[in-house]
Image (cartoon, rainbow, N blue to C red):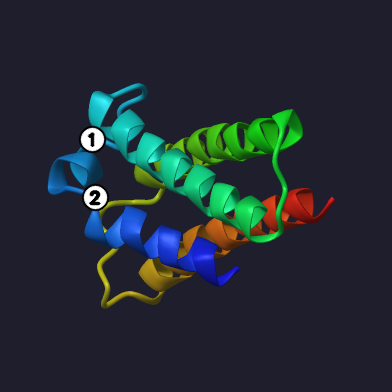
Amino acid sequence: MTAFLVKHYLGDYVMQTSAMVSKKAIFFSPEGLTHAAIHGALSSLVVCFGLLWVGASGSDAIALTLGIGFLDFVIHYLLDVAKARYVPSSLTPETQLHWVFFGLDQLLHNMTYIFFIVCFLN
């Protein structure tokens, strides 16, 4: 789980540009797709290193690595678009509702990573 949390930090806070943030509400914007693709690629790396760590290889390992990366791309993209489109931009960090939605967003991303770990363990 730690590797996915570090991946999330890198993808959302280090590698995300202001253009990516400002274009998330637009379906299929190159910036939003790029941001989601970064998450998908980073998740594939996490899974790849995890599989190498346990000595897994072969076509099943490749399928799991690419599958988790693609799933993270799609899920991360949809969560970000939904947040950008449906959470009022008037909410500022001074309002409790801002933190409710921020926390919900982070919870959903973390639940995605738990799902990926369950897939990895099976």
Q: Residue 84 carries which label?
A: none
Q: Relative to residue 113, is residue 61 depicted above or below?
A: above
Between marks 1 and 2, how big is the CA–CA gap? 11 Å
Please name the amino acid that badge 1 sits on: Lys
Please name the amino acid that badge 2 sits on: Gln
Q: Position of residue 62 (x, y in %)?
A: 64, 33
Q: In which quarter of the image is the N terminus?
A: bottom right
What residue is pinned by disc 2?
A: 16
For the point 30% across and 33% down, the residue is: 34
- Asked whether 81 or 33 is in front, the reply is 33
Q: Where is residue 2 in the image (x, y as percent from the top left)?
A: 54, 72
For the point 76% across and 48% down, the residue is: 119
Assess disc 1: are there few (<14), some (14-19) or many (≥20) residues with their C-alpha within 10 Å of its C-alpha: some
Q: What element carries label 1?
A: loop
In the drawing, does residue 104 fall left or right of residue 98?
Answer: right
Q: Position of residue 77 (x, y in %)?
A: 45, 37
Toward which corner of the image does residue 9 lie, by quadrant? bottom left
Q: Residue 23 carries which label?
A: 1
Q: Is mark 2 on a helix, strand or loop?
A: loop
